[in-house]
Amino acid sequence: MALNKAPAGTGGTLLMLPGDGIGPEVMAVARRAIDWFGARGRFSFEVEEDLVGGASYDAHGAPLTDGTLDKALAADAVLFGAVGGPKWDGLDFSLKPERGLLGLRKEMGLFANLRPASVFPALADASSLKAGLVSGLDIVIVRELTGGVYFGEPRGVEDIGGGERRGVNTLVYTTPEIRRVGRVAFELARKRDGRVCSVDKANVLEATLLWREEMAGLGAEEYPDVALSHMYVDNAAMQLVRDPGQFDVIVTTNMFGDILSDCAAMLTGSLGMLPSASLGAEKDGRTPALYEPVHGSAPDIAGKDLANPLAMVSSVSMMLRYSFGLREDADLLDAAVSGLLSSGLRTADIMQDGKTEVSTGAMADALIGELDRRAARG
Ligand code: IPM
Ligand code: MG
């Protein structure tokens, strides 16, 4: 685990993969933030940029080329924008933009996806839930990311004759797959409020009954100090909107985590606010890591200077914290984001009465101004 890793010094290699849709626009803001730190000598990254998803398909005929994958494997961290869009809807499954992201996750071994959903005080009113239910909300969803029904075999669509077809996916989990992501969740809970809720569908799906049994075993054997509870996923979805404050760390399967994290994101007021970190197993002192906003490529607003860049900026902050141990810089960036919101600036997705609506570019300018002000204050 890279959590609390010692500072790696002042440098590192970074691969930026902006991708499709609003990906390039929000990545440009991430770049400005990183350059701001670089220009002040706080750290300097060797930054490379490459194509992924539909953009890579258009240029190279594949959503993830071997060359890009090699760069990702060699980098200390990957910053990822978003992939996908209607332009590529008709492509064969193996060529779809999303395969680029899934391929990176699989090949980099990024089995643990951390998706924090915390509410900025200034945004409690932007939630679709009553402010009282979400203010102070601070949940982390730990989503298993390289197994489950996303990757299980057999899979595919086959002809079964008579003009009919059969579609198959397989939900499969093994003990080590469950336990390694469980450890990430338990370790995280130890640094937070000490509570893990493991979400499954153990009343119906054997693979997730195993999930429940392994989580229970792991908790009892290695983390007796952490309070572990179990919840069926349908109930968890309901509880997230009924009383989200009851959760600390949620650990769940790949697909349940996909669904619940969108739901949790909305509690915070906008999908445009949520960052994420995807981490692999530490080897030779290095932990493979990819950071991305939870929001997608939002093709409907792409290229219009409307996207909310703050989830991407917060993803940079997670990267500084987890991959490079640059806690002070991450704190500064987080404080700058909070400051922007407190000052009333809003992109369209989180616009509220009485606030000031700004474009992506204007939000980026304001971010740099906020960093300057805070740095000057010391
Ligand atoms: C996410 C996304 C991806 C997923 C897609 C783009 C493949 O929805 O990261 O949540 O399903 O994992
Ligand atoms: Mg998703």
Image (spheres, grey):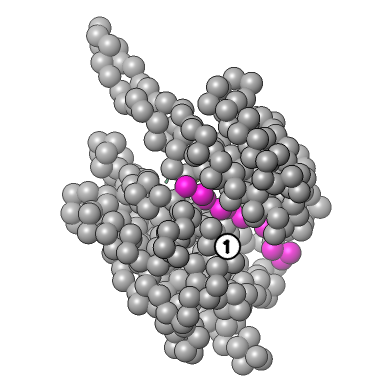
- The location of residue 170, given as percent across then percent down, is 42, 26
Nearer to me, 127 or 148: 148
Residue lying at the far front of the rendered structure: 221
Compared to 61, does 325 lie above or below?
A: below
**Residue in the picture at 74% in, 52% down:** 194
Instruction: Give the residue at x 40% y 75%.
Output: 12
Name the residue tied to disc 1. 3
For the magenta stretch, what is the residue range? 111-122
Q: Which residue is rendered at x = 47% and y = 89% of the image?
A: 41
Q: Quadrant of the C terminus?
A: bottom right
Quarter residue 305 falls in: bottom left
User: Between residues 125 and 191, which one lies in front from this camera angle?
Assistant: 191
**Is residue 26 found inside the magenta-colored segment of the image?**
no
Task: Write the residue at 18% across / 54% down.
Answer: 60
Q: State the SS at label 1.
A: loop
Q: Position of residue 134 (x, y in %)?
A: 75, 52
State the residue in front, 335 or 114.
114
